[in-house]
Amino acid sequence: MHIQQKLTPFIWYQRGAEDAVAHYLKVLGKGLVLHTQRWGENAPGEAGTVMVVQFELLGLEMTAFNGGPHFKLNEAFSLTVACEDQAEIDHLWEQLPAGGGKLKSCGWVEDAWGLSWQLIPRAWFEMIRDPDASRVQRVFQAVWGMEKIDIAALRRAYDGH
């Protein structure tokens, strides 16, 4: 296997990395498993169980590692999805936390394995780069009051309505 990227996110799961990857591929719909490595004899993990899943998701190669309880995922690391429209935000908001995850504020969700995701409309990135500081401030104020991002409400805040 040839790694195409110079940087690759490495995500430490306590367990269930293969289930997490399968969930992401199902929900986001664009990706594939590139390689699965199992623990061998005399290794920290149970021999024969999955140690590493290398996968591609939305064009990004990543590594999922079943590392045990030594480290826990938290919001200090998250994946941002630049959503095209409200339908995509709504779909991901419902599906990513399915099976035991949590809905958070400001467009964040946590999946059942503890990985945090930011579901942000692509238009957001244009809005926050506007040279008009008052427009940018209104957009941030609107987001801080939301759980799931509402693109129409963001647009109204941006336009000053």
Image: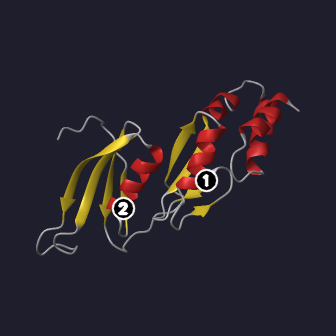
Distance from the alpha carbon under mark 2 to that under mark 1? 21 Å
Judged from the image, the secondary structure of the residue bearing numbered disc 1 is strand
Q: Which residue is mark 2?
A: 19
Quarter holding the C terminus is top right
Q: What residue is pinned by disc 1?
A: 108
Q: Are marks 2 and 1 in contact (CB under 8 Å)?
A: no
Q: Residue at x 41, y 38 (%)?
A: 58
* Image side of residue 133 versus residue 85, left or right: right
Q: Secondary structure at mark 2?
A: helix
Q: Which residue occupies 58% across, 56% down? A: 109
Residue at the far left: name it.
41
State the residue in front, 5 or 38: 38
Q: Earlier in the sequence, mark 2 or mark 1?
A: 2
Under mark 1, the amino acid is Trp
The quarter holding residue 103 reads: bottom right
* Horizontal side of residue 100 vs 33, given as left or right: right
Q: Residues within 10 Å of mark 2 (few under 14, many from 20)?
A: few
